[in-house]
Image (cartoon, rainbow, N blue to C red):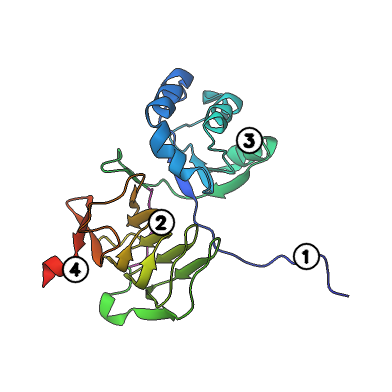
Amino acid sequence: MKPAFDIKSARLDALAIQLNTAEEAAIRRTLNERAAQYAELSDMPLLLDIQAFSEPGDLDLDAILGLFAEHGLPIGTLRHRGEAWQTLAREHHLAFCEEGISNSEEPKEAGRLPEKRPAETPAAPQPGNRKTLVVEKPIRTGQQVYAENADLIVLGLVSEGAEVIADGHIHVYAPLRGRALAGANGEHSARIFAQSMQAELVSIAGIYRTFDQQLPPHLHRQAVQIYLQKERLAIAALSDMI
């Protein structure tokens, strides 16, 4: 008889909220100021990075979790280092992620996702040696494809709520309506190419942008490339490159 469920390995990228202060008033103020922007993230898994704090007693985690939940941003995972923090996560029924300190900066265009790297990062594969993953079928809502140490080529539609991730470049030869995250291992030279730009979110090396308004006509539903230019995301029509 087939079991009611199985447990299998999976990769799930979570957006990391890097907490810089335990002052509840300051957190509430930022949440209120950016409510419209953060509404775009309500259906994404969220991780609370509290590595800026040295002791669990430095912050009222119950109150902080409540503030984010009020804005539709429930936290599912806690990130820090050490047994005391793992105990704190368990007490609040949160998953625990133990990683080295991540580097992040104040958001520029829309924001920055902290790069997920161990304390000693192995050298990233050179583009000339990188493999390519080709996906011929459409990627449906709720599905995620990750090209580890590889470029990703998608020949079908990337639906709303779907996610494509690659450590290298991403090419979508169909409408891109979901989320695309290139340079997931921190490669700033990675690019995203889309035949029809309609994305919910794009990210390169952790620097991301959401789209709550339609892009200008020369970019919306057009063939574009997305790349980093002085730590900002740039979107250019491919027709302009000819």
Q: In the picture shown, does residue 217 fall above or below 156?
A: above
| Residue count near mark 1 (Cα–Cα under 10 Å), binned few <14, some 14–19, many ≥20 | few
**Tag in front: 3 or 1:** 1
Task: Say if the magenta span includes residue 117.
Answer: yes
Find numbered disc 4 in the image and state the secondary structure of the residue it sits on: helix
Range of magenta residues: 113-123
Q: Secondary structure at mark 3?
A: helix
Tell me the residue that label 2 is attached to: 117
- Tell me the kind of residue under disc 4: Leu
Q: Are marks 3 and 1 in contact (CB under 8 Å)?
A: no
* Label whose residue precedes the other's in the sequence (4 or 1): 1
The quadrant of the picture occupied by the N terminus is bottom right
Residue named by callout 4: 238
The residue singled out by tag 3 in the image is 88
The reply to whether dot 2 and dot 1 touch (C-beta < 8 Å) is no
On the image, numbered disc 1 is attached to which residue?
5
Residue 189 visible (yes or no): no
